[in-house]
Image (tube, rainbow, N blue to C red):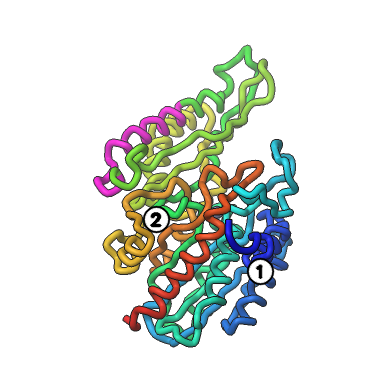
């Protein structure tokens, strides 16, 4: 390969620094956020660090903007946090020390998604920022790997923070897509279903109410709901998610009872639902709750008035469904030579951004199958070409196009 080795490039140095911050979601990401903020400030961006304390840990989101105060701007976004690596077997290198074997680059976050963050800010540095005809903005979030909760909190202040700027309608989120474009993804909600029964001696089942047995009735309802949701799937969702076009519940974890000779008093089912675009968590849960009250709880209460089935700890990440016929989407498809006809198989901050009117398109270097894995890696080719592509996107959208 001609030219200097990649280890001597500024992109390597920036990526290496970002990888070296341990930003596992349970820890503070403030040092990494400040590093990004300083870099952007030094090249002329206005920067706002939005700090918050989450379960006694200090977190930060980075918002940065530059260019004329006109509509039609572009947001480039990514998350600063990473998934855990400690205790994950199979690592051959130090996850916090970026390394390469010449073909791939290794380290936690190289694909998901710190190298993209480095590519994005360096692409901005290489852009003639005084020539911008439309604003360029960055949003780097915390707690994306915790069901997008960082962006979920941030969206309430984003319009106010960009104060003098019309809020851009579109965002590019650089999750690892192998440079494919995803205009949509399902949302995700997790929650516990708890059956509160009545305990007792296993020799006298008529004197108690077995929570595990009642939970099996609830599970039947979930299975029925899945079948129905699949049948009702819209044509659009069949196109975007051909394999599983509907919302779908998953029974993830179950605990209940104390001993084989006791009637189980309580049973807890930790459940999730992948929410197809067009559906909402509350809409999916309401008919389910209605059914279990009518078909299960009513008869339970006749045996034990204090018994019940409750839903607890609901966390929601909304789905994303950005228009495929949007001007930015056309631009992105043309520039990358890709189509935007499938949904991503994972959720991103884009679902949260859409709550305030920002349509996101998921596109970035790295491979999904590398994300969250031991020896997370990124092809060297993605490392090199990714930045040039981000540069072309910024140039094409914010400089070559007049303000809309
Ligand atoms: Zn990610």
Q: In which quarter of the image is ligand 1?
A: bottom right
Q: Quadrant of residue 183?
A: bottom left
* Cα gap from disc 1 to disc 2, whole angstroms: 26 Å
- Residue that appears at 72% across and 60% down: 21
Q: Quadrant of residue 57?
A: bottom right
- Looking at the rendered structure, the secondary structure element under dot 2 is loop
- Residue that appears at 56% across and 24% down: 210
* Residue of label 2: 181
- Looking at the rendered structure, the secondary structure element under dot 1 is helix
Q: Is 346 located above or below residue 36 in the figure?
A: above
Question: Badges 1 and 2: C-beta atoms under 8 Å apart?
Answer: no
Give, as a single range, the part of the protein colored magenta. 217-237
Q: Quadrant of residue 182?
A: bottom left
* Residue of label 1: 33
Does the segment drawn in magenta span residue 21? no
Could you say where residue 337 lies in the image, as x and y percent from the top left? Answer: 34, 58
Disc 2 residue lies near ligand 1 with CB under 8 A: no
The label on residue 383 is none
Could you say where residue 51 lies in the image, as x and y percent from the top left? Answer: 65, 71
């Amino acid at each position: 390969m001609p030219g200097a080795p990649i280890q001597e490039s500024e992109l390597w140095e920036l990526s290496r620094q970002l990888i070296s911050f341990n930003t596992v979601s349970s820890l503070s990401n403030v040092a990494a956020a400040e590093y990004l903020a300083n870099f952007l400030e030094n090249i002329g961006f206005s920067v706002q660090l939005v700090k918050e304390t989450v379960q006694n840990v200090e977190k930060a989101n980075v918002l940065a903007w530059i260019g004329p105060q006109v509509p039609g701007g572009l947001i480039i976004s990514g998350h600063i946090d990473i998934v855990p690596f400690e205790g994950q077997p199979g690592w051959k290198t130090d996850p916090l020390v970026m390394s390469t074997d010449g073909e791939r680059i290794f380290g936690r976050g190289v694909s998901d998604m710190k190298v993209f963050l480095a590519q994005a800010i360096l692409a901005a540095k290489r852009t003639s920022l005084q020539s911008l005809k439309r604003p360029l903005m960055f949003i780097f979030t915390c707690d994306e790997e915790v069901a997008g909760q960082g962006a979920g909190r941030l969206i309430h202040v984003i319009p106010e923070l960009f104060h003098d700027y019309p809020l851009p309608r579109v965002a590019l989120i650089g999750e690892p897509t192998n440079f494919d474009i995803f205009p949509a993804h399902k949302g995700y909600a997790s929650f516990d279903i708890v059956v509160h029964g009545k305990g007792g001696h296993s020799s006298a089942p008529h004197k108690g109410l077995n929570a595990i047995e009642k939970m099996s009735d609830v599970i039947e309802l979930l299975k029925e709901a899945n079948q129905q949701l699949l049948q009702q799937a819209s044509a659009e969702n069949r196109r975007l998610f051909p394999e599983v076009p509907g919302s779908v519940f998953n029974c993830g974890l179950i605990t209940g009872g104390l001993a084989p000779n006791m009637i189980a008093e309580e049973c807890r089912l930790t459940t999730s639902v992948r929410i197809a675009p067009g559906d909402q968590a509350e809409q999916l849960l309401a008919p389910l709750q209605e059914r279990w009250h009518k078909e299960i709880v009513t008869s339970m209460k006749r045996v034990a008035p204090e018994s019940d089935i409750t839903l607890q700890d609901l966390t929601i990440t909304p789905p994303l469904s950005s228009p495929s016929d949007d001007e930015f989407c056309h631009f992105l498809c043309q520039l990358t030579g890709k189509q935007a006809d499938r949904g991503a198989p994972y959720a991103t901050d884009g679902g949260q951004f859409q709550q305030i009117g920002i349509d996101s398109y998921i596109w970035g270097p790295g491979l999904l199958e590398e994300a969250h894995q031991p020896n997370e890696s990124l092809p060297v080719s993605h490392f090199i070409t990714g930045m040039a592509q981000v540069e072309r996107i910024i140039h094409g959208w914010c400089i070559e196009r007049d303000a809309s």
